[in-house]
Image: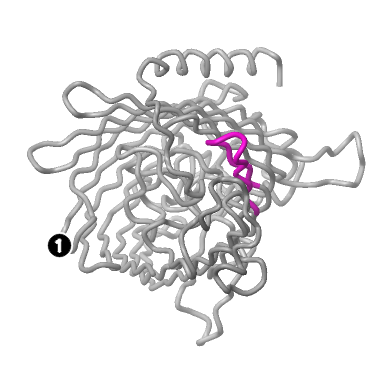
C-alpha cells in the first residue's frame, strides 16, 4: 500500500475526532468486555441472537450471560485482582464464568435457482451456537464459541435438513483472549479467532463483511469516551510457506473510526469510516473458490478465468451514517452506506445502500419493520467474505424487507424477503431470470 492511503486514513480520523471533540462526555463508560457491549442506540445490536442487525459480531451480549459468583471486577477496583477464585469459590483461576448461546429454526424458499431453468428450492435449516467467557480479573478474559455448519464454509453456520439423518457438524468458530489494561481505560486488545469488532450498517450489515466470519489475528479497540470509538486489526488470511518471494502471505489490515453526536431535538447522528486492505490475494485456489459459491459464471469478482488470480486489488473504503430518532413513541433509524475499492481494475468500483428500520424488539409483543436497497458494483467489495444471504455477493442490485416480532423474553420470529438481480450479465446466460427472490421465516431463541 502506498503512503497516500495511510495519510488519507489518518486525515479522516483526525477530522472526525475534531468534529466530536467538543461534544465528548467526561464521564467514563463502564468497562464491560468489548465483545459484550454496543456503541450507540442508533447502531445497536438489539437482539444478539441474530446476525441480521449488528454493530459488530459480538461474542456475547450482556443481557444473556449468566455470571456465576459475582459481578465483573470482583471488587478489585481496576487493579487486576487475580485471587478472586478464593473469594468466590470458583474452580481454577476463574473470577466470572459466563455462558451464552442461541438457536435458530429456518424455512427458506429460493426461486429460479437453477441454470437456464425456473427451478425453485424449498428447504429447512437450523443453527445452534454455544459459548462461554472466562474472566480471570477485570483485565483478562478468555472466550470461545462453537457452532453448527460446515467447517470449510466460514460464511454460514446453518445446517440444511438433508443427508438421511446424519449427525450435525459442530465446530469451534471463536477462541480468543481479551486484555483490558487498567492503566489505559477504554483500551482492549483481542487476539486469536474473534469478531472484527466493527460498527456496521444497522439495517443490513453484511455487504462488505459477513457477520458469521471470524478472522484470526490481533485487534485493538479504543474508546476514550462514549462519543468516539477506534478499531484496528491485522488478520492472517492465508499463510504460504512455499516459494518465498513468489507466493507471499495474504493478510487483511483494517481500521475504523466511529463518532456519535447528540442533536438538539433528542436525536443522534452516528458516522463511521473504515478501511479494508488485502495483501497478496492471488494466486490461491482456496480464495478463488470463495468467489463463486453457486458455481462459476462470473457471479463474483473478476478473475482470469477462475484459475489463477483476481484481476483487481482490494483497498476498500467503507462509510456508514445512521440517524436515530423517535416518531411519536416509535424508534426510527435511517441509514446510508457507501463503499469504494481504490484497487479495482475498472470503473465498477463502488456501491451504496440506503434503508430504515422502525420499531423495536425489547419487550414481548414489540414489532420492528426494516427495509434496505443496495447497489453493489462488481469490484466494489471482496466477494469471498461478503454476505451469503443474496445469491450474488457482488455485481448486483436489490432489496431486503421484513418484520421482527418478539413473542417472549427470549424469542423473536422474523419474516423477510430478499430480491436481487445482476448489474452486468455474464457472457453466457446462467439463470433463466436475472431477478431472483429468497423468502425466509426464522424462529430465533437466545439463552
Where does the image place residue 39, in percent across and percent down from the top left? 40, 39
Residue at image point 64% right, 30% down: 277
Asked whether residue 338 appears in the rendered view, the answer is: no
Closer-to-camera residue (317/395): 317
Quarter of the image where the N terminus is located: top right
Quarter of the image where the C terminus is located: bottom left
Residue at image point 13% right, 43% down: 330
Query: How many numbered discs sit on the rendered protein?
Result: 1
Quick check: is 183 in the magenta stretch? yes
**Is residue 443 depicted above or below 234 in this figure?**
below
Residue 69 left/right relative to 150? left
SS assignment at label 1: loop
**Quarter of the rendering containing residue 30:** top left
**Quarter of the rendering containing residue 434:** top left
For disc 1, the marked residue is: 365
Residue 53 left/right relative to 152? left
Residue at image point 53% right, 82% down: 163
**Is residue 338 depicted above or below 66 in this figure?**
above
**Quarter of the rendering containing residue 145:** bottom right
Where does the image place residue 117, in percent across and percent down from the top left? 40, 59
Closer-to-camera residue (122/361): 361
Residue positioned most to the left: 328
Quick check: is 425 in the magenta stretch? no
Within 10 angstroms of label 1, few (less than 14), some, or many (20 or more) residues?
Answer: few
Residue 188 left/right relative to 98? right
**Is residue 54 depicted above or below 346 in this figure?**
below
Asked whether residue 290 appears in the rendered view, the answer is: yes
Where does the image place residue 403, in percent across and percent down from the top left? 22, 54
Where does the image place residue 284, in percent across and percent down from the top left? 75, 45
Q: Which residues are magenta?
A: 177-190
Residue at image point 27% right, 56% down: 416
Amino acid at each position: 500500500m502506498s503512503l497516500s492511503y495511510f495519510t488519507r486514513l489518518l486525515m479522516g480520523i483526525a477530522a472526525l475526532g475534531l468534529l466530536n471533540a467538543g461534544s465528548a462526555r467526561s464521564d467514563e463508560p463502564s468497562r464491560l468486555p468489548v465483545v459484550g457491549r454496543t456503541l450507540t442506540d442508533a447502531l445497536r445490536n438489539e437482539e444478539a441472537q441474530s446476525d441480521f442487525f449488528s454493530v459488530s459480531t459480538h461474542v456475547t451480549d450482556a443481557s444473556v450471560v449468566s455470571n456465576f459468583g459475582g459481578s465483573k471486577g470482583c471488587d478489585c477496583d481496576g487493579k487486576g485482582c487475580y485471587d478472586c477464585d478464593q473469594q468466590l469459590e470458583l474452580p481454577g483461576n476463574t473470577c466470572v464464568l459466563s455462558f451464552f448461546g442461541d438457536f435458530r429454526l429456518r424455512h427458506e424458499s429460493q426461486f429460479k435457482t437453477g441454470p437456464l431453468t425456473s427451478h425453485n428450492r424449498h428447504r429447512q435449516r437450523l443453527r445452534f451456537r454455544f459459548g462461554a467467557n472466562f474472566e480471570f480479573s477485570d483485565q483478562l478474559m478468555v472466550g470461545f464459541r462453537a457452532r453448527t455448519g460446515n467447517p470449510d464454509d466460514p460464511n454460514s453456520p446453518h445446517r440444511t435438513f438433508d443427508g438421511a439423518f446424519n449427525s450435525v457438524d459442530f465446530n469451534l468458530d471463536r477462541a480468543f483472549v481479551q486484555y483490558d489494561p487498567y492503566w489505559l481505560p477504554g483500551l482492549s486488545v483481542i487476539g486469536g479467532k474473534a469478531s472484527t469488532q466493527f460498527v456496521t450498517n444497522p439495517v443490513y450489515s453484511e455487504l462488505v463483511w459477513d457477520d458469521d466470519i471470524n478472522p484470526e489475528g490481533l485487534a485493538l479497540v479504543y474508546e476514550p469516551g462514549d462519543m468516539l470509538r477506534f478499531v484496528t486489526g491485522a488478520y492472517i488470511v492465508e499463510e504460504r510457506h512455499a516459494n518465498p518471494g513468489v507466493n507471499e502471505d495474504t493478510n487483511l489490515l483494517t481500521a475504523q473510526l466511529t463518532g456519535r453526536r447528540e442533536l438538539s431535538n433528542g436525536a443522534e447522528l452516528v458516522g463511521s469510516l473504515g478501511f479494508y486492505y488485502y495483501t497478496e490475494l492471488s494466486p490461491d485456489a482456496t480464495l478463488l473458490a470463495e468467489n463463486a459459491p453457486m458455481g462459476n459464471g462470473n457471479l463474483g469478482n473478476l478473475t482470469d478465468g477462475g484459475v489463477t488470480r483476481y484481476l483487481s486489488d482490494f483497498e476498500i473504503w467503507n462509510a456508514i451514517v445512521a440517524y436515530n430518532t423517535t416518531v411519536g413513541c416509535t424508534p426510527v433509524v435511517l441509514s446510508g452506506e457507501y463503499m469504494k475499492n481504490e484497487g479495482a481494475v475498472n470503473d465498477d468500483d463502488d456501491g451504496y445502500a440506503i434503508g430504515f428500520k422502525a420499531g423495536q424488539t425489547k419487550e414481548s409483543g414489540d414489532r420492528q419493520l426494516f427495509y434496505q436497497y443496495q447497489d453493489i458494483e462488481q469490484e466494489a467489495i471482496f466477494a469471498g467474505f461478503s454476505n451469503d444471504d443474496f445469491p450474488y455477493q457482488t455485481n448486483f442490485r436489490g432489496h431486503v424487507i421484513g418484520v421482527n416480532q418478539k413473542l417472549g423474553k427470549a424469542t423473536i420470529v422474523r419474516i423477510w424477503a430478499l430480491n436481487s438481480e445482476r448489474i452486468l450479465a455474464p457472457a453466457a446466460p446462467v439463470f433463466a431470470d436475472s431477478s431472483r427472490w429468497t423468502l425466509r421465516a426464522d424462529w430465533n431463541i437466545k439463552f
